[in-house]
Image (tube, rainbow, N blue to C red):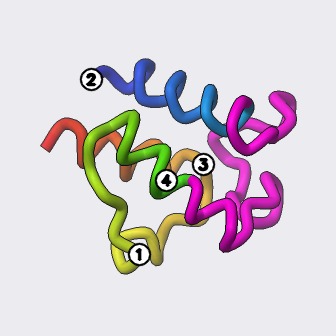
Amino acid sequence: MTRQEVEEKVNDFLIEDLEIDEVKIAPEATLKGDLGIDSLDFVDIVVIVERNFGFKIKPEEMAGVATLKQFYDYIESKVNA
């Protein structure tokens, strides 16, 4: 899966499933501060990622993920492993 495909899928579920305003979505946006993703949203993200990308997010692997770019990097590293 290409980086562009990863970014498009992630952006789509952020907009459609979590109802995040499209104008807020940028690689440097922080997940919690800028996008307003909370612990309940994170539960949804785990399910959505498993459905769309075929792997389970491990909370300990997400510990260092603060920005959307880091989230893209994480997803890309898992789907292309």
| Residue occupying the point 27% across, 41% down | 54
Whichever of callouts 4 and 1 sits on the residue coming sooner in the sequence is: 1
Question: Distance between the Cα atoms at labels 4 and 3?
Answer: 5 Å
Whichever of callouts 1 and 2 sits on the residue coming sooner in the sequence is: 2
Q: Which mark is residue 59?
A: 1
Question: Distance between the Cα atoms at labels 3 and 1?
Answer: 16 Å
Task: Residue type at mark 2: give it.
Answer: Met
Question: Distance between the Cα atoms at labels 4 and 1?
Answer: 14 Å
Q: Secondary structure at mark 4?
A: helix
- Mark 4 vs mark 1: give the one in front: 1
Residue pointed to by mark 3: 68
Residue pointed to by mark 4: 70
Instruction: Give neighbour class at mark 1: few <14, some 14-19, many 20+ (Cα, 10 Å).
Output: few
Question: Distance between the Cα atoms at labels 2 and 3?
Answer: 18 Å
Instruction: Give neighbour class at mark 3: few <14, some 14-19, many 20+ (Cα, 10 Å).
Output: many
Residue 23 in percent (x, y) is at: 86, 30
Task: Residue type at mark 3: give it.
Answer: Leu
Q: Secondary structure at mark 1?
A: helix
Residue 3 in percent (x, y) is at: 38, 26
| Image quadrant occupied by the N terminus | top left
| Residue occupying the point 38% across, 39% down | 51
| Residue occupying the point 67% across, 60% down | 41
Residue 47 against residue 65 in the figure, above or below? above
Residue 67 in percent (x, y) is at: 61, 56
Q: Are marks 4 and 3 in contact (CB under 8 Å)?
A: yes
- Mark 2 vs mark 3: give the one in front: 2
- Locate residue 21: give its quadrant: top right
Residue pointed to by mark 2: 1
Q: Secondary structure at mark 3?
A: helix
Whichever of callouts 2 and 4 sits on the residue coming sooner in the sequence is: 2
- Boundaries of the magenta span: 16-44
Q: Secondary structure at mark 2?
A: loop
